[in-house]
Image (cartoon, rainbow, N blue to C red):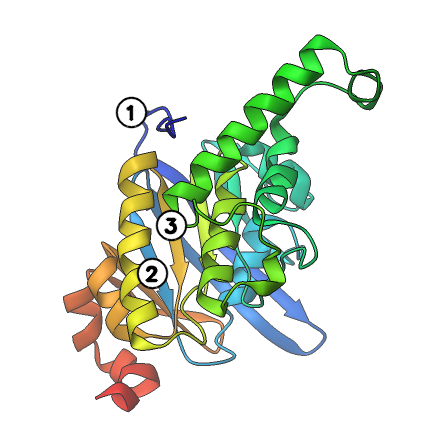
Amino acid sequence: MSVAPAAARDDPALLVVDGATCRFGGVLAVNAVSFSVARGELFGLIGPNGAGKTTLFNLITGLTAPTGGHVRYQDTDITGLPPHRVAACGIARTFQNVRLFGELSALDNVMIARHVRTRSGLVSGVLGLRRARQEERETRERAAALLALVGLAERPEERARNFSYGDQRRLEIARALALEPELLLLDEPAAGMNKAEKRALSELIRTVRARLRLTILLIEHHVPLVMDLCDRIAVLNFGQLIALGAPADVQKHPAVIEAYLGDEA
């Protein structure tokens, strides 16, 4: 089964973050951050440890409630919605730490996520009704297609815990894609990978973006990967947006060099 591309839309602004703010007690983790992500864009978010990147992801995906500002997705205010409702809108994410079901097979891990999109209820499934059987078959086919897309087609029945770290990252991306998102958020997908794995991941992200016509928002500490992949980059430092623009421009920005890229040089 081929993986069908997401439907294209004319509206260029898929995601708008407007003055997003998050305070934990006396700590201002995200301070009035604003940016927009165009439909089809691969947008990078970088910054030193503790800059507020993952907190901002959590605000967008409903894991953390903002203390100020708004998040709009496809002209709908999703500020403060719970994660399952954000996912239903068409937003999926991965996490810094792999969160797979280790004892389940690769196929089952992806199918579990895919079940969010099925319509048959528990009773129909238990009774084995025709509609439920058809949806289960379609879910299995879709999950297998996504495993093929991320390069794991030959290992559908292998337990997730037996996969290498790099392949677990690939499996987590396949599971996120099972939600059929238009916007995919990747939180440090290259963390812990060696150079060869990072190169392969970069190619995978390009492939996923092209095949599914996705919009991707990427957090990553490996600066060369971000500079090579992304159309635009936003830089956070101490919760504030200090730079936004094309990779070449951001790389030369004095505040960015001081806060982050100077160490890379």
Which mark lies nearer to you, 1 or 3?
Answer: 3
Where disc 2 sits, the SS reads helix
How many numbered marks are there?
A: 3
Where disc 3 sits, the SS reads loop
Looking at marks 3 and 2 on the same chain, the residue that comes earlier in the sequence is marked by 3
**Number of residues whose C-alpha sits closer than 10 Å to that of mark 2, classed few (under 14), some (14–19) or many (20 or more):** many
Disc 3 marks a residue whose amino acid type is Gly
Q: Residue beneath label 2, please?
A: 201
Q: Position of residue 156 (x, y in %)?
A: 53, 45
Question: Residue sitting at 49 percent across and 69 percent down?
Answer: 165
Q: Position of residue 203 (x, y in %)?
A: 26, 55
**Disc number at residue 10?**
1
Which quadrant does the C terminus fall into?
A: bottom left
Q: Position of residue 217 (x, y in %)?
A: 39, 53
Disc 2 marks a residue whose amino acid type is Leu
Task: Return the residue found at the far top.
Answer: 130
Mark 1 → mark 2, Cα distance in angstroms: 29 Å
